[in-house]
Image: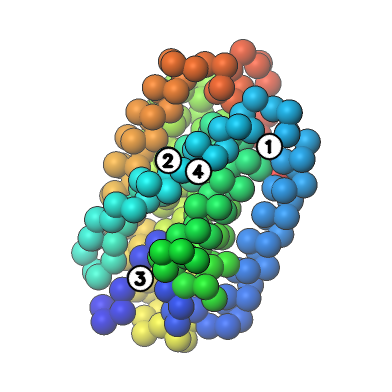
Amino acid sequence: MTRQIRMHIPDGFLDPWVAGLLWLGSGVAIGLAVRRARDELGDERTPLLGVVAAGIFAAQMLNWPIPGGTSAHFVGGAFAGMLLGPSLGVLAMTAVVTIQALVFGDGGIIALGGNLFAMAVVDVLVGYALFRALRGVHETGAAFVAGWGAITAAALAVGVGVGLSSAFSYELSVTVPIMVVGHALLGLVEGAITAAVYGYVANARPDLVLGRGDDSLSLEVGL
């Protein structure tokens, strides 16, 4: 490809209507997360928001090239959702993706809505949903599947957004397979890292793990 697509979408890759829709979707999700986070300010996980965001920010700086002119990196949205819950997880990833765009130029400003939608909304909520659905079967395995499934879903969101845009040279038939297949393979690494880090936190500080000691495993992805 003469123009590379990657998880952080640059400006010029999205048509205005696509960028606008993604901004709208991200804005609604983040707004709901802010509203629900107000009810969690006394939660013991709240102080972790900055720590988790900083760790994910550092991990995202490492990129690996994949075939087809794209690149991938650890995203961390699933881990944020698993440890912080959906609302605080969305806010943590929102801070990470926004700072990367505004300070480091990683992803465009106009395309920021699309990047937030993929990494701060889809990644977090899919990861959280998968983990909550599977943790009763095997907690470590659930963390792995959550990390893998979340980054694959986020890559699908990027591939669809870019593929629908006439501003980009390639259509859905090219952008979706390249993003999904590439990130599904490297998602194995994301899943392994997610499971390893989650396992460490769960053993070292089980009091900080969402749902530990709570028989209720209800799915709360509605923010």
Q: Colour scheme in the image? A: rainbow
Secondary element under disc 1, as helix, strand or loop, is: loop
Q: Is residue 79 visible?
A: yes
Q: Nearer the viewer, mark 2 or mark 1?
A: 2
Q: Earlier in the sequence, mark 2 or mark 1?
A: 2
Q: Earlier in the sequence, mark 3 or mark 4?
A: 3
Residue highlighted by disc 4: 53
Q: Which mark is residue 11?
A: none
Residue 118 higher or lower than 133, as above or below: below
Q: Nearer the viewer, mark 3 or mark 4?
A: 4
Residue highlighted by disc 3: 5
Q: Nearer the viewer, mark 4 or mark 1?
A: 4
State the separation of the CA atoms marked 3 and 4: 24 Å
Q: Nearer the viewer, mark 3 or mark 1?
A: 3
Residue 119 higher or lower than 127, as above or below: below
Q: Residue at x 61, y 48 (%)?
A: 91
What amino acid does circle 2 point to?
A: Gly
